[in-house]
Image (spheres, rainbow, N blue to C red):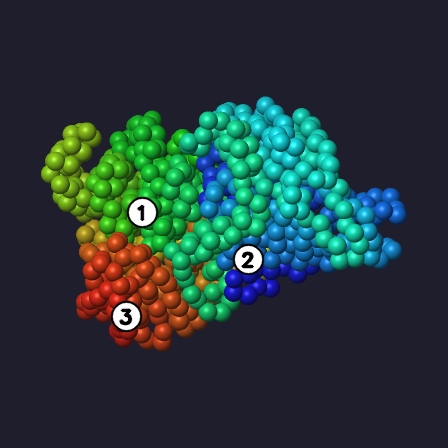
Amino acid sequence: MNSGWTWSYQGYDPQAERLRETLCALGNGYFVTRGAATETPAGPVHYPGTYAAGCYNRLTSTVAGRQVENEDMVNLPNWLPLRYRMCPSDAPPGPWLSPDHPQLAEHRQTLDLRHGTLTRWSTYEQEDGRRLRVKQTRLVHMGDPHLAALRTLFTADGWAGEVEVETGIDGDVRNDGVARYRELASRHLADWECGHEQGDTVWLSCRTLDSDVRIALAARIQVGSGRGVPPRTTERGGQRVGQRLRLPVLGTGSTAVVDKTVALYTSRDPAIGSPLRAAVDGALAAPDFPRLLATHRAAWEHLWERAELEVPGEAGEILQLHLFHVLQTLSPHTAELDVGVPARGLHGEAYRGHVFWDELFVLPFLNLHLPEVSRALLDYRHRRLPAACRAAREVGRAGAMYPWQSGSDGREETQQLHLNPRSGRWLPDHSRLQHHVGSAIAYNIWQYCQASGDMEFLYGHGAEMLLGIARFWADCATWDPSIGRYRIRGVVGPDEYHDSYPGAAEPGLDDNAYTNVTAAWVLRRALDLGRALPEACRRELCERNHLGEEEMARWDDIAHRLYVPYHQGVISQFAGYPDLAELDWAEYRRRYGDIRRLDRILEAEGDTVNRYQASKQADVLMLGYLFSPAELADVFRQLGYALDDDIWRRTVEYYLARTSHGSTLSALVHAWVLARVRHDDAWSYCEEALTGDVADLQGGTTTEGIHLGAMAGTLDLVQRGMTGLETRDGALWLAPAPLPQLSKFAVRIRYRRHWDIGLALRAERVRVAVPVGGNGPVHVRLGGRTFTVAPGADRWLGLPASHSGYPAP
Ligand code: BGC
């Protein structure tokens, strides 16, 4: 179905169409358009969504007798519409054609990853044998983020006459892509206006209802190489605008071409007078299709150079697709925008385009290729620091409490109720208690600064956020004299299945190990940073934040004495976890087959997953994902706990047997953690992480958007997981743990001032290549030794004997 740089589908399959639309979506970081057919509007089979990064709107709905507010990433007017029919000179016009029409005889489509184009070939055949071959290529321009283009070629076979084409912009769209949200309000657009300019260009403008973002699209419609011929009619409805034209085809083999060039602007864009003027001018001034294609391809070539990853075989092909979608969601253009990391890409409406902790799986990858994008994504968080501080104050806490789900202004966007499609019941959603999102932001700040060396950010915006998050954790920690430890109570960990104790009146759990360990890490990093800041900077920051020695001394105390529960020689997910019932996993698998969403199954049975030792995704094991064994053992030592190889391996086995992997992040984290301890099952989790989206393993969720965290995470699994790469203390630290199935690969990374360091792994050896240039040597730490690789040098280093890296018991 694919080979190297292309991703292809043979034949038309209505059942698979929505999945293909997601996987064949095209974008440039500014906006993404799903790979939907141009011939049909949204319906059960097709969903032509277009989404601009950061364009949200809020609506109120009534569900289960309650008024609920939701903020959604808005589905924008559809620029794709283009349909056609055969008008033979000796017969009446045929029907309007589309892949759903019975006259479809052949169909295939190919996504060209290297050049960022989607091409569809269709052949339609009438009963009398007359055929129309259609080839359509589209792009969303990677160089000019406001442009997209669609070239359609029609070739007649066995007839002569005209092809009638109808094409335009459809503003009559709503957010209708996720079945679970259908009871919610979905009309985000209002005040449509339409028009046309210079004969061949149509435009449509509108605005979002509450956020009042003005949106404008203009489409220039050109025929062949010239403009304005043959005659066309412009049609304007209330929410649609388009043109109809007839293209002559002279006989068999005769081809007619129509090009549609689209410009999209919103009132969030800088350097424009009005979105409408910018869109119309953009469409009118855009080069013709061949020249647009050439500059688009060149922009992609440059981008690929900055994110090269060579992995042989099928895994390599899927990774290439993942990289393509990561770069389409978060491209160099993202560095100019005020946007976060949307959990489901800009590829669909699941999770409403919200920003979760998933950036934890994305930024470490970007840091080593597009650090300016990482910084912009962290600035999105920094601009919302006041909102996070306000949220903390509202619950009586100090510091910054970042929202579990973030959108336009940084307030908490987690839905109040969610629907269990299995039972049809709307249930309270307590996932907002996942305050560990703050630690993810702190972790990313630290990682970004280590990889990029951006001290200006660390000492400025980074420090402000880190201090705010540390202060929040310190204020959450309460001293419990009965155990002689600090505790953080009433939270939810990464495993969303557990949001309260069975039968408890209030939601929340106590002493979530992941939350506490990462909180201790954040406090320590904040203190380290406090010490490292230049004196004037430290004074200013402390004065501005009213931070004194006494408060920092308390942070230090908490960083050493937060509670981490254990049971049966393993780290407990939270206090009381071992008291929960064991689930009969075999029985549930037998009865339901796929039990990834065990929470929904149990709720539909009238039970609750809260009663069981059953996790949706990695929780304790996330610690082995975030931290190298040495660093994790160090945090535990600081807390006064033992963490050795035995405890860690037992902990891994314990949760492996009790996790349903109801999130795509879970397989990824398990692949990473199991690979690091050389577990036999590592590859099967790796395969699951790789195929999560291409095979839609979570059953229909990829149709609603990619899983960006898992996609970027698989890239990072190779880049950092297999190599054990860390960027700290001015060196590249390597501790390779390659899987036999992934033991040969090469990546190029950007590390501080070095733009193009090559890392390659081949049987038992690792290669480090530093490009010629004036940026000095690179220090590499491997197996307890330091190697220096000079500019222009290329060194092969032997791998040390394998060892998990956790201290021996
Ligand atoms: C996972 C979360 C994740 C969210 C968005 C959920 O299913 O449990 O960890 O942040 O999806 O990707």
Find residue 589 and report its horizontal and vertical position in percent.
55, 59
Could you tell me how far apart the alpha carbons at marks 1 and 3 are, in whole angstroms?
A: 30 Å
Q: Quadrant of the N terminus?
A: bottom right
Around disc 2, counting alpha carbons within 10 Å, would you say few (fewer than 14), some (14 to 19), or many (20 or more)? some
Around disc 3, counting alpha carbons within 10 Å, would you say few (fewer than 14), some (14 to 19), or many (20 or more)? some
- Decide which of tag 1 and tag 3 comes sooner along the chain: 1
Judged left or right of residue 113, residue 809 is left
- Asked whether residue 717 appears in the rendered view, the answer is no
Q: Amino acid at mark 2?
A: Asp
Judged left or right of residue 405, residue 465 is left
118 vs 133, nearest the viewer: 133
Judged left or right of residue 567, residue 686 is right
- Decide which of tag 3 and tag 2 comes sooner along the chain: 2
Which residue is located at x 55 percent, y 57 percent?
A: 112
675 vs 378, nearest the viewer: 378
Q: Are marks 1 and 3 in contact (CB under 8 Å)?
A: no
Judged left or right of residue 750, residue 183 is right
Q: Determine the image quadrant of residue 9.
A: bottom right
- Asked whether residue 461 appears in the rendered view, the answer is yes
Mark linked to residue 794: 3
Q: Amino acid at mark 1?
A: Asn
Q: Determine the image quadrant of residue 383.
A: top left
Mark linked to residue 112: 2
Which residue is located at x 61 percent, y 25 percent?
A: 193
Find residue 370 and report its horizontal and vertical position in percent.
36, 50
